[in-house]
Amino acid sequence: MNVGIVLLRLIHIFAGVFWAGAVFTLARFIEPAAAATQPESNKFMQRFMGGGFVMAMGIAGPLTVVAGLILYWIDSGGLQNGWIATPAGLGFTIGALIGLIAFGIGFFISRTTAENLTALGKEIQAAGKPPTPEQMAKLKALQQRLTDSSVWAALCLVVVVIAMATSRYL
C-alpha cells in the first residue's frame, strides 16, 4: 500500500465532497432563500460571504484540484496517451477538465463577486442608512452574478462527481 497515494485520495475525496456539497447547497438552497427574503437577507448574506465560508471554499477547491492533478499524473504514468485513451482515462480526463472549469468559475467569478458583495455591504452599513438606488442596483447585479456562477459551478460539479465516481469502473 502506498501511503502517499492513500493520503492524496483522502484529501481529494474529503475536500471534493465539501467543495461540491457546499456549492450544491449554496446554489440550490441558500441563494434562492436569500433572494426570496430580500432585503432582510442582506445582512445574513454579508456575514455568510464575509465569514469562514469563503475561506473554507478557498481551501477546499485548491486542495481538491492539486490532489486530483497529482493523482491524475500518477495514474496516467506521467500523462501517457495509452492510459488517457482508455475508457477510465477518458472519464477521469473529462472529470478533471470540467473540474478545472468549476474551479475557475469559483475562483475567478464567485470569489471576486462575494468579495465585492461584502465590500458593498460594509459600505452600506457604514453609511447607517438604507442603500441608495445605485447601491441597490449594484447589490442586485452582484447577487445575480453570484447566483449564476454558483449554478454553473454546481452543474459542472454534477458532471465531475459522476465522472470521478464511475471512471475507474469503465
Image (cartoon, rainbow, N blue to C red):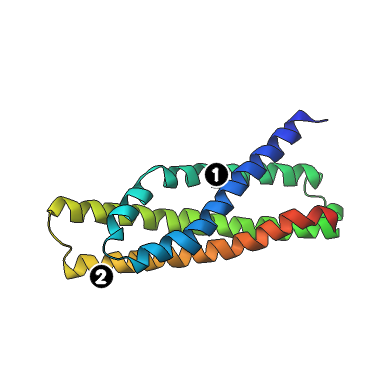
Q: Residue 9 sits in which quadrant? A: top right
Q: CA distance from mark 1 to mark 2?
A: 32 Å
Q: Position of residue 4 (x, y in %)?
A: 73, 31
Q: Is residue 169 left or right of residue 131?
A: right
Structural crowding at the residue carrying mark 1, measured as other residues with C-alpha within 10 Å and reported as few (<14), some (14–19) or many (≥20)? many
Q: Position of residue 112 (x, y in %)?
A: 39, 55
Pick whichever, 24 or 85, lies toward us. Answer: 24
Q: Is residue 122 left or right of residue 34?
A: left
Classify 34 as above or below 60. below
Pick whichever, 159 or 34, lies toward us. Answer: 34
Q: Is residue 36 left or right of residue 170?
A: left
Q: Amino acid at mark 1?
A: Ala
Q: What secondary structure is found at the residue carrying circle 1? A: helix
Residue drawn at (56%, 49%) of the image: 19
Residue under pointer 1: 60
Residue under pointer 2: 137
Residue drawn at (60%, 55%) of the image: 100
Classify 148 as above or below 50. below
- Label pair 1/2, CB-CB below 8 angstroms: no
| One can see residue 163 in this view | yes
Q: Amino acid at mark 2?
A: Ala
- The image quadrant where one finds the C terminus is bottom right
Q: Residue 12 sits in which quadrant? A: top right
Q: Position of residue 142 (x, y in %)?
A: 34, 64
Q: What secondary structure is found at the residue carrying circle 2? A: helix
| One can see residue 85 in this view | no
Q: Earlier in the sequence, mark 1 or mark 2?
A: 1
Q: Position of residue 43 (x, y in %)?
A: 28, 54
- The image quadrant where one finds the N terminus is top right
Residue drawn at (28%, 64%) of the image: 139
Structural crowding at the residue carrying mark 2, measured as other residues with C-alpha within 10 Å and reported as few (<14), some (14–19) or many (≥20)? few
Q: Residue 136 sits in which quadrant? A: bottom left
